[in-house]
Amino acid sequence: MFDLTFTVDTQDTTTPLTLAIDQMVIAGWTGRDPVARDKHIAELQEMGIAPPASTPIYYRASARRLTQEDSIECTGGDSSGEVEFVLIGWQGRIFVGCGSDHTDRKVEAYNVTVSKQMCDKPIASTVWELEDVIGHWDRMILRSWATIKGERVLYQEGTLDAMLPVVDLIARGFDGGKFPDGCAMFGGTFAAKGGIRPADRFDFELEDPVLKRTIKHGYDVVTLPVRG
């Protein structure tokens, strides 16, 4: 278990809160459209990537991979980020944040679980109360930009109505449908515009167009050499 300090934004006020986190879950295949999901699974199989054991699927990775730093170090040049909403449980409450499931794509091709452990997972330092946004959850927007060779391009964008509702996502992944305290769960992502590719920097955000606020974070990617 380790602690991360966040700023809880309740619109009227902001409050610092240190959360103890002892597990990280990365939910995959969380799209609502089963036809699109199955089509993508078939496409991946043609590329030699095995289909998921279940949909959705809940991968586990070390909680200490979470970071609020503005840079991460990755071995080799085969990793890339992807924006996701993040749920964090604390004393029976659930907070909503935004993070990047940065993943080694070369490793992902032969073992998704191992690939999730390869890279740090940057997360923004601001969170919202789930109860403040659940009423307009589907209208919220995830968005990311990749800076590649000095050019910043829109990398991902979509509204949360394309993903499973929070209640369903929790019910399928946790006993009794109760989200555990100390758990940080990444909730899924959107396809990359122009295809998945590495970047020198990755910026991401979760926008709430109803309450007119945004959670943002960004980080540089430092590539470490592969020897031998």
Image (spheres, rainbow, N blue to C red):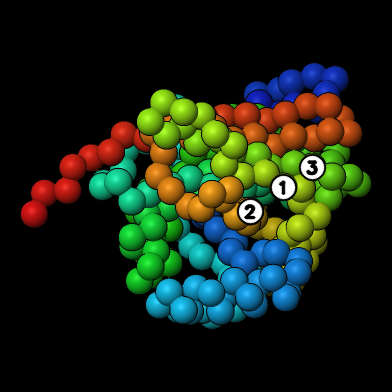
Report which residue position mark 2 lands on. 190
Q: Residue 151: percent from the left, percent from the top?
A: 46, 28
The amino acid sitting under disc 3 is: Met
Q: Which residue is drawn at 26% across and 47% down?
A: 76
Q: How crowded is mark 3: few (under 14 residues within 10 Å), some or many (20 or more)?
A: many
Report which residue position mark 1 lands on. 158
Tag 2–tag 1 contact (CB < 8 Å): yes
Q: Residues within 10 Å of mark 1 (few under 14, many from 20)?
A: some
Q: Which residue is drawn at 51% across and 53% down?
A: 195
116 w.r.t. 130: above or below? below
Please tell me whether mark 3 sits on a helix, a strand or a loop: loop
Q: Earlier in the sequence, mark 2 or mark 3?
A: 3
- Badge number at residue 86: none
Report which residue position mark 3 lands on. 140
Q: Earlier in the sequence, mark 2 or mark 1?
A: 1
The amino acid sitting under disc 1 is: Gly
Q: Is 128 left, or right, of 72 in this rendering? A: right
Pick the front one: 54 or 182: 54
